[in-house]
Amino acid sequence: MYPDLTPIRIGIGIDAHRFVAGRPLVLGGVTIPFDLGLEAHSDGDVLSHAVLDALLGAANAGDKGKLFPPTDPRFKDVRSTLLLHEAMREVIKLGYEVGNVDASVMCEEPRIGPFREEMCDAIATALGIDTSRVSVKGTTLEGMGFTGRKEGIAAIATVLLVKQQ
Ligand code: MG
């Protein structure tokens, strides 16, 4: 990494996973009652994955596939908030703290609203920050595209990092 004179840095992350039967649905570290889960090597927590990519992107600390290879059996069914916690340790080592996180989950169902606060709490805990710094919203895409056809769930996130003095 080249010398960094920027006191604040922004990152963006996006992810999508396909619905599959026989797995729990985990979003933002919260297990949500639903008849389908998300296909993945990890727990399939698409929201945490988007936040993870945004966090690593903001820090220019590589991508999550390199840090947590899906071929590594250690990460089979791993709780993705645990990966967030691990990544945050790296970000702290680089001298940054999280200013805020904002994320949107795109799906027709389940409804995100009832679990919003719990998701914010779980993500904030994983990052070691106050819940007030984390925002999670849900949106449908009006029946369009793969989320509209209820094939899976997508998420997008931004993370702002602030250099520690
Ligand atoms: Mg993913």
Image (cartoon, rainbow, N blue to C red):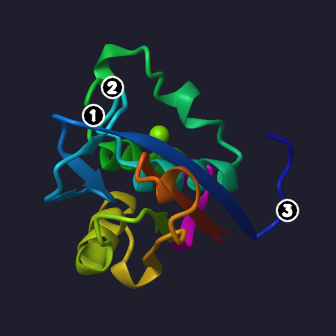
Secondary structure, mark 3, is loop
- Type of amino acid at the residue the image marks with label 3: Leu
Q: Earlier in the sequence, mark 1 or mark 3?
A: 3
Q: Residue at x 61, y 54 (%)?
A: 13
**Residue beneath disc 2:** 75
Q: CA distance from mark 2 to mark 1?
A: 5 Å
Q: Which residues are magenta?
A: 91-102
Q: Quadrant of residue 115?
A: bottom left
Label 1 crowd bin: few (<14), some (14–19), many (20+), radius 10 Å = some
**Residue beneath disc 3:** 5
- Residue contact at pointers 2 and 1, CB within 8 angstroms: yes
Q: Nearer the viewer, mark 2 or mark 3?
A: 2
**Residue beneath disc 1:** 78
Q: Earlier in the sequence, mark 2 or mark 3?
A: 3
Query: Residue 4 in the image: x percent, y percent?
Result: 83, 55
- Type of amino acid at the residue the image marks with label 1: Val
| Number of numbered callouts drawn | 3
90 with respect to 13 (left or right)? left
Q: Which mark is residue 89?
A: none
In the image, residue 58 lies in the stretch drawn in magenta: no
Instruction: Tell me if the residue at label 3 has its CB under 8 Å from ligand 1.
Output: no
Q: CA distance from mark 1 to mark 3?
A: 35 Å
- Nearer-the-camera pick, 115 or 100: 115
Label 2 crowd bin: few (<14), some (14–19), many (20+), radius 10 Å = some
Query: Residue 19 in the image: x percent, y percent?
Result: 34, 42
Q: Residue at x 47, y 71 (%)?
A: 140
